[in-house]
Structures are given as structure tokens and as C-alpha cells.
Amino acid sequence: MSAYLSTRVSLFSGHLWRAEDFTALLRAPTAEIPQTLVDGGLVQLAGLIPGNDLHSLEQSIIAQLLDETLVLLRPLTGSARAFLLYWTERFEVTNLKTLLRGKMTDERPAALLNRLTPMGAFGHLDVRELAHAEDVAELLRRLESGHYAGIVRQARQAFEDSHDPFLLDAALDRGYYEGLAHRARQLEKEIGPALRQLMEPLIDRINLVWLLRYRFNYKLPPAQVYYLLVAAHSGLSSSRLKELAALSSLADVLAALPEGLRASLGGAATIPDVFARMEHSAAKSAEKVLRSNAPAIARAFAYLILRERDLRGVRAILRGRNLGLPEAMIEHTVGPLAREGI
Amino acid sequence: MFRARPMSRVTLYCLTSEAQDVALLLARHGLFGLAADKEVSFPESPGDEYREIYLEADARLAKIGELCGHLDIPPLPPDAIAPNLRELKGINHRLRDMWQKCSACADQGQKIEEDIRRLAALRDTFGRLKTLDVDVSRLLKADSLLDSRIGQVPKANVKRLKEALQLAGYMLTVFDQTGEQAFVVVAGPRSGGELGGVLSQAGWRELVVPPELRTNPEIAGRYLEREAERLQDEESHYCDVKAQSVGAQGDWLGQARLLLALARPLAETALGGLRGSGQLVSFSGWVPRDEVPRLGQALEERFTSRYLISSREPDSSERGHIPSFLKYPAWLRPFVPLVKSYGIPRYGEFDPALLFALTYLLLFGAMFGDVGHGGVILALAALFHRKLGRAAWLGIAAGAVSMGFGLLYGSIFGYENLLTPLWLSPLHDPIRILTVAILFGVGFIVFTLLANIWNQFAAGQVSEALFDSTGLAGLGFYLGAAAGLAAQAGMPALAGLSAPAWSLALIGISTVAVFKWVKTRAGLGERALVTAIETLETGINLFANTLSFMRVAAFSLNHVALALAVFTIANGLGTAGHWLTIFLGNVIIIVLEGGIVAIQALRLMYYEGFSRFFSGDGTEFAPLKLVGVR
């Protein structure tokens, strides 16, 4: 089974886009975009261009990722399978947040359903029933008796006490990533440290970006910021996160980071910049794992991380072009991909 | 029975104000399948809002039903009319109000349950508060310097919360644990850091310690008892309110259910087939050709000239989209799911259900011919016919055919010497049974090729019907080669026909090769390769599929061989062991071999039969229907 998965991952890794593929898409005449996508192995997306709507584009990207995950899941069992399945659940957590937001704004069920991403075989939510919930309270009550009960229960209390949609989202996100980190630790016990090379940059990025956002955009107190972060067992430690949460500016936080991170984030002036740099270094780690002889599940996860980054890069270019943005602006947005590729 | 009923493309125009009643009439008629028509150029989708309101109302009614139990629905009056949009909105609003009340009841119920649980926890906790080395009354007393609270959080969150609180200068002490909950005291300086919503994020529930609990144990005990009684009263009162509100609205809820059932047809048409322009709407769809006059008559009776109906024959561009309306006699229906599990016949395509039923039974009987075993299958299917439903008929028919072949083979419970075979005993004449199986295979494949030729002509693909490997040319090759081989093997009926047979085969295969060459669009080398391989494949496939039918003979022999094995073991044992072995051996033969034979017969039908002529990618006719009414 491991040999099958390894071979499958190696075959899939041939689908990853190189720098010149992104450049070609960026520069291709509009009429040639579908062919460029077909050449890049993205036949599903090619069907949407030109004249696509952005929502369909997003749905197609997620459908592509889910299809590939389904193939990778076939030979997996036990905690490896549970981990990859859980990885796909974040798309459904996004659906869950969309449902909650829709109920808060009293959106009509039909319009709300139309905005959700179809999860196919990966779906756990009865979205039709949930979309017809009368209000947020009823929706949360229904969710509490379903697959996401663990994530939703505490989020509900946070929402009931504050009625702040942002805190509801934050609680859901934290619940999801706590679950992911927990499953990763279980899997690490079986397959060794290769997975840590992928999880550490991922959790560090989530924690640091959230910390900066919560602290400096939403002005939450340090105690609450710290509580909303994901409990880390490597990378940025709990004690370090506590120190960082107590600091009063982005520059102070970046200056207080451990040496490696401080070097890679030196000169970053904004939170999106921090995010982009950390995502880039996480992709580099994923590339290393993918090219190594690490256990097949770690390579499969690395592939999915890289594939998702590619697809989001493609989406950024297509969106930019669809909205008629200047080429230089799009290039700036997807710059690291187009310049360096993977 | 051999193909779908001929359909007409029907477009029906009526007033927008009567759209819901027209949809209701179409649903009662039960033979109108909705499908958008490109020729209708009305710009509006008038059913969208109606559908949305319907779905909301339906969801609310279902939720009320879930909470309040089964809702009785009154019988459908013959002159029932469907609610219009305004009426539907009214129903929806009333259902919303009712559900909000029900939902509030549910919330209240949940709250009471939580309070009861909390009171129980408080009762336990009260006894343990003394483990805190502090004076509780002083601890909880409002103070300008110390902010102290007592409450419960999930145990899993305690560590993280403790660390977070330290950032605000607070401390957390766990003084008790019950199940997944930890009871804690949180205290810190009022002038310290902000807590924000950290306690809520951690699932904090404040334990309200009433003043009574801060006094002596006797007063505290009486307080807890009083609280328990109050909550029980509240709970029973809540249940009464719920029962009364449902009881009072029960009739109306039944009416609402009926009205929603009547509204459903128009809501369904919004998915496709309904377009509008101002005061006019059009319904487009498919109706069986011979039912169009009856539909027109029903419309005339109900809407007297306030409608316009037109029907036409489907054009060639619509062929792939016409739904297949298939009707079967009752005895054939149990076999239909087995055909549908392969696919639905396209409109105009040969429907293989009858062929399937007859051939499947024949193959099963030939492979599992035994009067006793067939009789057991028949008896069991008849005995459990209530549980098995329609599938029982499959078992009865298969058992009966198996019994018939058992008589032909002279076999009963594996005994080959109790009955005289009416035809032959497979074990004593294996070559003959193999020959018969192959001849049956030839006949079956010829039939599938003929069916495919019919289907290709029906689909307008004349060149494929004539020249392809599964067309007339392929059939010529197959018949010629099969006859040539049979003549060479010395079959008396074909003596002297060897040369013409091989000539026919040569003409057939050459025609197939030329057709493949013409059809392939590629470079010279690739074209030659594709032609050679596909032509070769034609020959190999047809004969490999024919040989596949040898399994029919092989399984009939296997049946006897298995019985012989059982007898050999049984004969080596004493009387009791002998009969026990015979019994268990027969059970194993029926269960295991019966199961294998059933699957093999299905495999032969699907792979040697259906794959040759049956596309199975048709769409089943799904007419608009009234659902959920009596």
C-alpha cells in the first residue's frame, strides 16, 4: 500500500506547476487561457474560462483538490487516513462559517446554499437542513448534534456571551486546528518526525498570523489572544507565544521571534507580508519532504500543501485577469510563485 | 416492452395567476415530465420565489413535525386548488411564527435541563467547597481590589486557560472535578490585565452561588431542595405548554401539510421547464404521445380555453435528452432493478428487460439444475415473500426453472440415479452439454449484435450499424467464422458450407477493417496500428465471449461434482453422520453454489450481453407527481 501511495504521489508531483507555467498563464492571451490550463493539467478549470464566475472557480479548485485527495486516500487506513480526511474538513468548516454568517445576516436559504462548496463524498453536513435553520441559535443547536459538535460547542458559548461573529469564527478555526495538531501528533508517533517538518511551519504560520491579527487588528487583550492560538508542541512554543502576545507592536513581535524566523521575516512590514513569507518557507519545507524518501503519507500531505498553493496561485491570476487588473499588480500578488516556482 | 414509449414535446401556455393550479393538474395527470425547451424564449423564471418559499415552509413544517410528532393530513378533495404565492407566503409566515415558539420551547427545555444538571453539580460541589482553604462568603463578596469568580470549565481547557489568565495577572485553582468538567476559582487584581472574552472562549460557566449557600449547611440544603422542586415544576409546565400549543394547532398543521403537498408541483417546475413573461407562463416537457389528447381534455375541463397547448415530435438534436418511459408487466418488474443497475435504456434503444429475465433464468437453471435445490429456493422465496417483497418472485422463478432443469438432468438433491433424465445427465455426457452451451452462446451473441444494429439504426448511426465490428459487418464475420469452424469440426448440418462461410467471414472482417481505417483520424502509422489492433480485437472478443459460455456447462458439471464430494464424505460416516453430512452438504451447495451461479449468470448478461448493445446512459422518465397526499 505504501509503495502504491508513493508511486501515486510521485506521479501527482508531476502536476505541480513550475515558475514558467505561472508566467505563461499570466501572459497568455485571453483566448489561450483554457489551453494553458489544459496544458497545466487543470482541465476542470479550463471549462470555466473565459466568462467564469469567481465562485465557480473557487468551487472547481476545491473540487480538484478533493478529487486528488480521494485518490491518495484509497490505500490509507487508520490514523493516516483519519489525518488526510480531517485535512479536507477545513473546506467544510468554511461552509459552516458561511452558514453561520448567512444566518446572522438573514440570508435566504437558496442564496446561502448556492455559496457553499459542494463536498461530495467528504461532506458531513446536511447543508439543506442547516440552511433552513431559523436563526443562528437553532443552527448552532443543530450543529451541536452533528459531526462538528466538538468544534461548535465552545464556539456557541463564546458567541452567546459576546454575539461577536469574529469571535465565533476564531473559536471555530481554533477548534479545527487544535484537532489537526492533535491528529498530527498521533500520526507522528507512527511514522516519525517527517510530518513535523510540515506541521511545524503550518502551525507556526497560523499562530503568528492570528496573533498579529487578533492583537493589532482586532485589539484583543493578550490573555484572549493567547487562548485563541493553537497549542503548539514544536516551533513557536507556548512560553514564546505568551511573550509575543504581551508585546505592543508588530515590529516588537517580529524582533522577539526565534533566530530562524526572525531572519526569514526581517523587513516584513505588514501581516499579509508575514503570511506570504511564512507560506513560502512552508512550501520549501513541503518540497523537501516531497523529494525525500519520507513515509508516503508525509509525502502525500506535502503534495497536497504544494498543490493547494499552486491552485490558489492560479486562482489569483485568473481572478486578477477576470477583474481586468493590471498585469504588474497580479504579478506582484503571485510574485514568489512566478519568480521561483516550486 | 421492447423499447420506451414514444414521447411528444409539449409546451403549455397559461396565465401566471393560474400557474400553481396548472402545475397541480399536471401532477395529478402524472405523465408530464419537465424539461426546458430552447424554443421557449420567455425571459423570467416565475417559479423561483415560489420554490424558495415552498422549501422554507416545508422545512419549517418538517421541524415542527419532528418536535411535535406525526401530523395527520386530511384527505385530498377532488376539487383541491394549490395555494398561490401570496397564500404560500401566509402559510410560511404562520409556520415561522409557530416554529419560533416551538424553538423557544426547545431552548427553554434545554435551559431547564442545563439548570437541573447545574443544580445537581452545585449540590455535589457544595459539599466540597470546604476543600477550598478559603472563606467562600468572603471570597465571592464584591471587592474593589480582588476580582474573584467561581465556575466550571471543560477539563481539557484548564491548562490553556490557566496559562492565558497568567498574562492578565490572574490565577486559577481547580477545587473539584466531575466527569469532563472542572470546578475552578479564578481570581486576580481588579487593576490587572483585561480578560476580554477568554473565559467564554474556554467554555466557562459561572457557578452562581446564592447567598443561602454561603450560610449554614441546613439553610443551604433547604435552598437546594426548593430549587430542585422549582425546576421540576418549570419542566412539567413547559411540557404542558408545548402539548397545548401543538394540540390547538393540530388541525391547521394538517391543512398546512396538505396545502404544501398541493404547492409542491409548481415548486418542482421551477427546477426546469417553467418560464414566464409578464402575465403568461409556459410549462415545457415530455408527455407520452398517446397521452397528449387526454392531457388536453383534462386542461379543457378545468381551464376552459384559458390555456394553449402545443405538441410536436422530438427533433434529432433532442434525441439524447428524451427521457425513456418504460412500462413493464407485474411479473417482469422484479427483474428491472437488475437491468437498471447496469443502466437505463436510451430513448429508442432496445430495452433488454425481457431478454434479461428470460436468459437470466435460463442460465441460472442450466447451471443449477436440480429438482430438490430448486424446490428449496422456491419454497424459501414463497415462505418469506412478505419480507422479500418483489424480490421473492425472482427466487420463485429461479427455483422453478432450476427444478425444470433438474428434471431435464435427472438430478434431485445431487442424487443422479433417482430420476430418469428427460434430456441428458451432464456428468454422463459432458461434451454434449459443452457443445450446447457454446451454441447457446453463439445464438446469444448473434442476438446482441442484431440488437446493436437495431439501436444504431434507431440512433441514426447508419454507418456504424452497417460496417462496425458490432454492426452488420461484424455479424457477417462472426456468423461466417462460427459456421466455418463448425463445418470443419464436422457438424453435419453445415457440411459443404465451409468455403462460403469463410468467404462471408473474410468479407465481414475486411469491411470492419476498412471502416476502422476510415474512422481513425491520425497519422499513417498510428492509423494502421489502430486499424490492425481494433480489427484483431473484433475477432478475439467475439470468440472469447462465445467461449465464456462454456462456464454454463462447467457449472452444471460442477453442481454434480460437488454433490459427489458430499456423498463421498457422507458414505464414510455412520448413519447419523451420513445424513447430517448430506443435509449440511446440500445447505452449502444451495447457499454457496447458488450464490456463485446467480452472480455468474448476471456476469454473462452484463459483460457478454449488455456491453455489446446496451449503452445504459438514458434518463428515466420522471413525471411531475403529487406526493404526500391521501
Image (spheres, coloured by chain):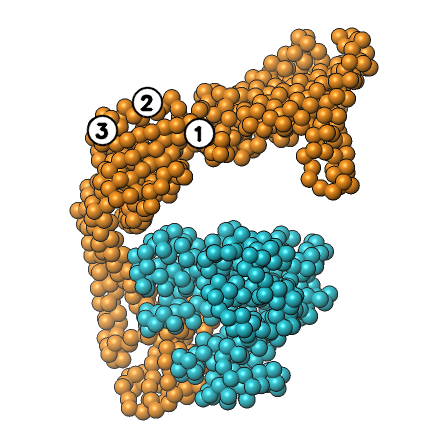
Q: What is the drawing colour of chain B?
A: orange
- At label 1, which amino acid type do we have? Pro
Q: Please tell me which residue lies in front, A97 or B476.
A: B476
What crowding class fits label 2: few (fewer than 14 Cα within 10 Å), some (14-19), or many (20 or more)? few
Q: Position of residue B187 (x, y in %)?
A: 37, 85
Sequence-first tag of 1 and 3 = 3
Give a yes or no on whether discs 2 and 3 share a subunit: yes
Quarter of the image with the C terminus of chain A is bottom right
Inspect this view and state whether residue B577 appears.
Answer: no
Residue for point 46% across, 69% down: A173
Which residue is disc 1 drawn over?
A: B314
Splitting the image into 4 quarters, where does residue B356 fall? top right
Q: Which chain is cyan?
A: A
- At label 3, which amino acid type do we have? Ser
Under circle 1, the secondary element is loop
Q: Is residue B303 left or right of residue A66?
A: left
Label of residue B92 in the image: none
- At label 2, which amino acid type do we have? Pro
Inspect this view and state whether residue A74 appears.
Answer: yes
Q: Please tell me which residue lies in front, A60 or B585.
A: A60
The chain ID associated with circle 1 is B
Q: Position of residue B51 (x, y in %)?
A: 31, 46
The chain ID associated with circle 2 is B
